[in-house]
Image (tube, grey):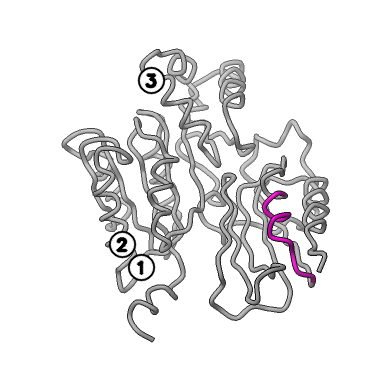
Amino acid sequence: MNDAAAGRARPPIPLVVLGGYLGAGKTTLLNHVLSNAGQRRVAVLVNDFGDINIDAALIRERTDDVINLENGCVCCSIGGRLVDALVAISARPERPELLVIEASGVSDPVKIAQIGLLDRSFRLVGIIVAVDTERIGATLRDPYVGDIVRRQIAGATALVLTKTDLVTGQEKAVATEAVSSLATTAILLDSANGSIPLELIFDASVAPRHRTGEQALAAGERFNSHQDICSFSFRSDFRLDRKKLREVFRGLSVPLLRAKGIVWLDQDASPQELHVVGGRILITPFAGHAAAESTIVLIGRFTDEDERTVKRCLESTQALN
């Protein structure tokens, strides 16, 4: 196998984009993740709006693998430098097990994710956007920055309300309603002191859907716990219709964080790799050895009824020939 083929055979690096407006608490959230990463190799690419990257200095206290991109919006004025940094990371002999891009407060995290995914060496895990609960109302009303923040919220695959310990219950309810009205994701969590569920970042932290004594959450409790992110799997020994499969994932209304799997599709002689995150559906040839059945793992905040609904939908994707 030549060097180019060997590079293509390497598994993609999971990519998380961490966004949110200035002062929303992104660095605090990131340091919490790094402090709980265990032995995982995590690289951080951080952009600050200014000549001196203060965020990078703060993050370096938790990991040595920090790449600086100073002076401007990571998705605009230094987009070329971002691409160069990603190419360098993907070419490393020993790649990181996760890359986190902390975007500047005035950037669009969706555009950053799109730049990252131009290189198939990376696979998007999520776009996590921090929202300052204490100031979100005033920020959205600001004629200069309100539109930026609305785009950040709308592009998120998961939203984290920060500084919830600094507001009253009523203020938190108002902020939650404002954010929910703009969100395209059903994954909305609150955080005090930077604590977020590691399930947003690391698959190994996700618990199976069925645990001893586990009870389905009532609808009103769905957004209040960090413990209810879980997973379940769908298996099938029949081939799936590619078009129907895409339609199912585009139309799901359950709080899905992401899905991944190895599937056998109607028009393909070899198995395919499936990744779904934030409404983005990626189906590519799978280079490794695969079982004869299709297997899809779904991660999110599911009730028992959510699981039954998803499985019924996936069963309807059976290919007719």
Which residue corresponds to mark 3?
A: 145
Quarter of the figure with residue 291: bottom right
Report which quarter residue 235 is drawn in. bottom right
- Name the element at disc 3: loop
**Label drawn at residue 95:** 1
| Front in this rendered view, residue 130 or 197 | 130
Q: Element type at marker 2? A: helix
Instruction: Name the N-terminal-most of marks 1 and 3.
Output: 1
Q: Residue at x 41, y 63 (%)?
A: 121
Percent of width and height locating residue 159:
54, 36
Residue at (28, 44) in percent of width and height: 79
Q: Which residues are magenta?
A: 238-247
Q: Is residue 25 left or right of residue 219?
A: left
Spatial distance from mark 3 to mark 2, Cα to Cα?
A: 32 Å
User: Which circle's residue, 3 or 2, is located before the other in the chain?
Assistant: 2
Estimate the x, y position of residue 183 in percent, counting from the top left. Answer: 58, 30
**Amino acid type, mark 2:** Ile
